[in-house]
Image (cartoon, helix red, strand yellow):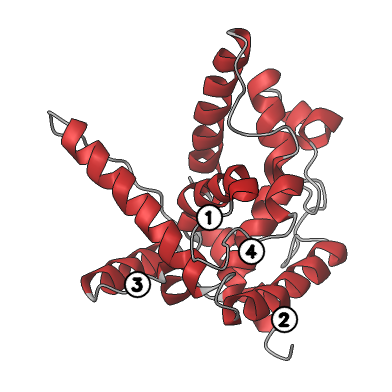
Amino acid sequence: MWKFWKLTLFQAQYRKDEEARAEGKDGFLPENLGDRLLEDFRNYIGADGAVRGDRKEDYELYVWFVENILSSVNYEVTLRKCKEARLRNQRDIVSRAYKPSDEAFAIMLLVNYEKRWRNLVLHPTKSRSALNSGELYATKYTSSMRGYSKLSWKQEGIEEFNRWIRDIVELRKEAKTGRLLEECVERTISGRRKSRVKRRDHEVIQVLPTMGGDLMRELEDLDQMTASV
């Protein structure tokens, strides 16, 4: 269910972007989403604690990443931690709820699936053969054609995952790329949540994702592989 839920969120945003482009406007998600997100990752806050004018668009991409990709990693655990942190009025929610390995894994998921997600919007198909081996739907670090594998990620992807864990640990230590950024993100998300509640004039039943099975085992395996890092 997790992969379909993420795909649905990506599809919804990408279709909005396509409609905007058809009207001569800019879309929200750039074509090189992964590259843009990871360029100077987490570095959007100035010395005054506010979002830098030259990094506003990249900051918004990070907020989107937190709400739409990171939020699904280890979902049941991290949702509880988010709620607990908000009850305590703690503002650095990302560090409180998500381990560096969670954030690194969310990065890897986006980088791995971005091309596939985008082309499933532009070139939808139900062909199992195309999804398994078609170049349009190829993922960067995983493959459904490798047969049974305890860990389906390529070695290159595992190494990249480990590198991002180390980088995120260091980024979270610095105020501008850590606490100040996360406090700003929480203000942005909370403000939008309040606006949505005010606009809501009827009960909405929200379908939440569940995490489990192979993806949880992959997370556990990746965490174990980084224990000695």
Disc with the residue nearer the chain's start (1 vs 3):
1
Q: Quadrant of residue 26?
A: top right
Give neighbour class at mark 1: few <14, some 14-19, many 20+ (Cα, 10 Å): many
The answer to whether 32 appears left or right of 105 in the picture is: right
Verify CB contact (< 8 Å) between mark 1 and mark 2. Answer: no
- Can residue 124 be spotted in the picture? no
Residue nearer the viewer, 84 or 88: 88
In which quadrant is the C terminus drawn?
A: bottom right
Q: Which secondary structure lies at badge 1?
A: loop
Label 4 environment density (alpha carbons within 10 Å; few <14, some 14–19, many ≥20): many
The residue tagged 1 is 51
Residue type, label 1: Val
Question: Badge 3: few (under 14), some or many (20 or more) residues near its Cα, within 10 Å?
Answer: some
The image's mark for residue 105 is 4
Residue under label 2:
225
Residue 139, given in percent of the width and then of the height, sits at 77, 44
Residue 83: numbered disc: none
**What is the distance, in whole Å, between disc 1 and disc 2 at their CAs?**
35 Å
| Labelled pair 1, 3 in contact (Cβ < 8 Å) | no
- Determine whether the residue tagged by mark 4 lies in a helix, strand or loop: helix
Q: Position of residue 28 (x, y in %)?
A: 58, 31
Residue for point 46% across, 56% down? 71
Q: What residue is disc 3 on? A: 81
Instruction: Spot the residue most to the front.
Output: 48
